[in-house]
Amino acid sequence: MNVGMLWFDNDPKTELSAKVERAASYYRNKYGSTPTLCFVHPTMLAKLIPGNAEQTGYKAAGVEVRSTRSVLPNHFWIGVNGVKVP
């Protein structure tokens, strides 16, 4: 994913899936397309499955969620997989 939107959500009472759903909804309204991929910090996925910070294949609101250390905690890099800048 080369093009995306950075979203910040540090609400400790909200589950990761709900945060991704909020970000995806905003993305759809703003850009008119449905996001398919979201990158989060590994610690955010580790909270879901302890001991597996590099987990892949997690989906929330129809969006694949992957971890990367290049995204800060509580941030979401969300967009459409395979879209490149012309």
Image: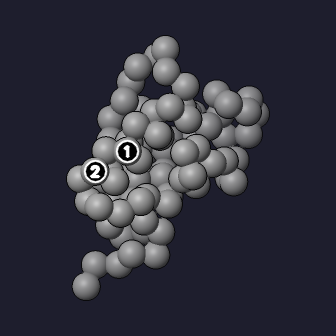
x and y percent of residue 80 in the render?
42, 65
Q: Is residue 22 visible?
A: yes
Q: Which mark is residue 25?
A: 1
Say which quadrant the C terminus sits in. bottom left
Say which quadrant the N terminus sits in. bottom left
> Taking 67 as reference, is 14 above or below it?
above
Q: Is residue 68 visible?
A: no
Q: How is the image coloured?
A: one colour
> Taking 40 as reference, is 38 above or below it?
below
Which residue is painted at 58% across and 44% down in the image?
60
Q: CA distance from mark 2 to mark 1?
A: 6 Å
57, 50: nearer the viewer: 57
Q: Which mark is residue 42?
A: none
x and y percent of residue 28 in the render?
34, 54
> Taking 73 as reference, is 34 above or below it?
below
Say which amino acid is labelled 1.
Ser
Would you identify the image quadrant in which residue 61 lies? Answer: top right
Residue 50 is left or right of residue 11, and the answer is right
Residue 46 is left or right of residue 72, and the answer is right
x and y percent of residue 16 in the render?
54, 32
Which residue is painted at 55% across and 25% down in the image?
15
28, 71: nearer the viewer: 28
59, 2: nearer the viewer: 59
Say which amino acid is labelled 2.
Asn
Please tell me whether mark 2 sits on a helix, a strand or a loop.
helix
x and y percent of residue 45 in the render?
61, 37
Q: Which residue is mark 2?
A: 29
Contact between labelled residues 1 and 2, with CB atoms less than 8 Å apart: yes
